[in-house]
Image (cartoon, rainbow, N blue to C red):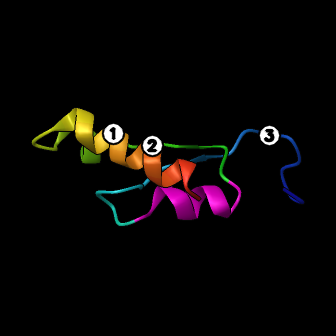
Amino acid sequence: RQVVGDLLILSPGVGAQGGSASSAIANGADHVIVGRSIYGAERPREAAEAIAREIASS
């Protein structure tokens, strides 16, 4: 935040690339970009809900 101020911070690489949503948010990201972890899952809805729970509990 010291460097970018109020600019929106988006964090890619969550899930399939090894990053965690809660870690990204805890380290200053405003939003996480999650693609393959959801659309590549056997149950995409459940995968999305699990990521949302992870973020909410962080």
User: Measured from the top left, where is residue 57 in percent x and y?
Assistant: 55, 55
Q: Quadrant of residue 13?
A: bottom left
Helix, strand or loop at label 2? It is: helix
Chain part drawn in magenta: 19-28
Helix, strand or loop at label 1? It is: helix
Give the alpha-carbon distance from disc 3 to disc 1, as whole Å. Answer: 26 Å
Q: Which mark is residue 7?
A: 3
Whether residue 35 is visible to the viewer of this picture, yes or no, is no
Q: Are marks 1 and 2 in contact (CB under 8 Å)?
A: yes
Helix, strand or loop at label 3? It is: loop
Q: Amino acid at mark 3?
A: Leu
The C terminus lies in quadrant? bottom right
User: Measured from the top left, where is residue 27 in percent x and y?
Assistant: 67, 64
Residue that carries the numbered disc 1 in the rendered image: 48
Q: Residue furthest left?
A: 42
Residue that carries the numbered disc 2 in the rendered image: 52
Whether residue 51 is visible to the viewer of this picture, yes or no, is yes
Image side of residue 26 versus residue 11, left or right: right
Residue at the image position 89 percent from the left and 48 percent from the top: 5
User: Measured from the top left, where is residue 38 in percent x and y?
Assistant: 26, 40
